Every structure is written in C-alpha cells, then in structure tokens.
Image (cartoon, coloured by chain):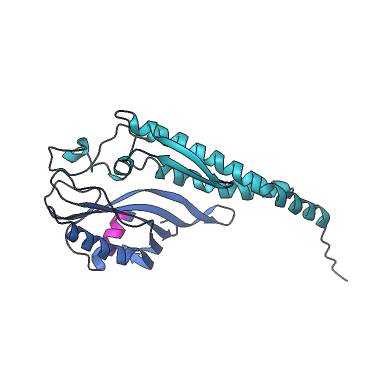
Amino acid sequence: MATGVAEDLKAYLVAQGIGGTIRNGALGPETGAMVGIVAYGGMPPITAMGSHNVVVRRFSVQILVRGPKADLAAAVTTMEAIYAVVAQAINVSANGHTYDKIVAAGEPFSLRPDDSDRPLLALNVEAWRRGIT
Amino acid sequence: MNVRLIVEGLPQLLRGLLLSQRAVPLRAGLRMRLTVEQIMAESRRLVPVDTGHLLGSAFVTQTGPMSYDFGYTADYALIVHEIPPGSGPSDPGARSSSGGLGGMRTAFHKPPTQYKFLEVPAQRHMANIEAGLAQDDLMGDLGWRMF
C-alpha cells in the first residue's frame, strides 16, 4: 500500500535525527512533548503533455510541535530542528517516494499553550512529490 | 524538388498581441477580484460558526490595482484555522476543542465547516488566475483555443 505524505515526512524527520514521539496525524492524548504531522490537501498538481500527465503532486502538510509543560524553549528548539531539515530540502527520498522539494510555507508560529500549559507551535510546509505515485 | 515554409497570420498575431497588451492589466485585475470573491464565498461556507463573530469578521480589501487582502479580522481566527481535528472517534480530543481531556488542542468542526477554512479554498482557486489569463484571455486575443 502506498504511503501518504505524512508517513513519508515522518520517516524523513526520523532519518534526519528528529527524536521523541512523532505521530502521523493530530497530537494525541499522551502526556508530554510530541510532534504531529497532518496532511490537509494542497495545490493542484503540475501537469505536462496537454495537462494529461501529473508530473508533480503538491501536498500541504502541517507540522505541530507540543512542548513539555510550561517549557516553550524546548518546543522552540524542536521546531527549529525540524525547520532546519524541511525548509529547504530537495530530492528527498522516503518510503520509495521522491520529493523534488520540501519547503516551508511560512515561519513557525504559536497556537498558544493548551489547557495543560504545554506550548504548541505549528509550521506549514509544501511537499512536491514526483510522479503520480 | 523543394519544400516551402510559409508563416501566415503574422499581422493578425501582432494585432492580437497589441490588443492583449492593452487588455491584460484590466482583465487580470477583474479576474483576481473574481477569484478572491470565490475564495471568500467558499471560505464563508467552511468557517466554523459558534457565536458568528469569526464569520462576521470576513473581509476583502483592494490594496492596489492588482492587489487584494482578504481573510478574517477576529483575533482568534488563526487559532481556529490551524488547530486540526483529532484522529478519529477513538481520540477523545476529537470532540473537544478545549478543556477536560488533557488539553490536546484538537478541534471538532461540524461538517462542512473545517479547520484551514481559508487556505484550502485559496489553494483551490489560486490556479484559476494564471490559467484564466493564459487560456481564456490571452489565447482569446490571439484567436487561438486551447485543446
């Protein structure tokens, strides 16, 4: 079964040395720090040959970082580590897919601490996957 | 034996280009305005409604001949826009936007409302500006048709 972009991005982050719990999807009920990867659509694909062939699929992905209770610095450190490997990545291979590029759609931003006073940061990225697979 | 190559229609092409040069800025502005209104019309259907304040804060402002700002002025718009739904029915946070469940910060929105209520329609409609200019306007001026 083909893997989704969120699973691919998770595999890429792990390969790049991003540690801790990384969840494919929104943040879960588990306690403590966590990274969540949510795919939420994207731009229309780039096509060629009279618009009949999909050359590149353009996914939009949200990366969420939750820090330990009342520890914004830890969340920022994790987010910056993730930003460093996704903001300008090219020719990324993951789970048999090739991504021509992965780029940040903006800067990381805060979504305010949750009710347990855990800081929550978000970063939106675009992932351009080669071919129709 | 010989081969003759003839380019026909050059005067018509030049006339078309001249026409396009004059018309494109106006058409681009109109097409952009139309696209922005389409984005916001779709976004208003997708934006979560509780008190109606967020929906009521939708705006479109023309900031230049071919420049528009659009979105929502409510100070919590970004939070509602960016906090995703939970992973499913087994995920308790999926039914709670705040409090009581460890503060997971997931948000359930009654369909068709959803998070990313502005970005998703914007992505869907943005490509129409370029495609519309290239296929409908410019090709029309030149008397060509895409197939």
Residue B108, quarter of the rendered image: top left
Give the camera-side residue of B73 and B21.
Answer: B73
Percent across and percent down for residue B123 are 45, 47
> Quarter holding the N terminus of chain B?
bottom right
Q: Residue at x 22, y 68 (%)?
A: A17
Q: Is residue A75 left or right of residue B112?
A: left
Q: Is residue A101 left or right of residue B76?
A: right
Bounds of the magenta segment: A6-12
Residue B54, quarter of the rendered image: top left
Q: Is A9 contained in the magenta span?
A: yes
Against A22, is B69 above or below?
above
Give the camera-side residue of A116 and A96.
Answer: A116
Q: Residue at x 12, y 46 (%)?
A: A116
Principal secondary structure, stretch drawn in magenta: helix
Q: Residue at x 31, y 59 (%)?
A: A8
Which residue is farthest top?
A: B51
Q: Is A48 contained in the magenta span?
A: no
Q: Which chain is blue?
A: A
Percent across and percent down for residue B11 are 83, 55
Residue B97 in sight here: yes
Residue A3 in sight here: no
Q: Which chain is cyan?
A: B
Give the camera-side residue of A42 and B66.
Answer: B66
Which residue is farthest right?
A: B1
Percent across and percent down for residue B126 are 50, 47
Q: Residue at x 12, y 37 (%)?
A: B100
Which residue is farthest front?
A: B63
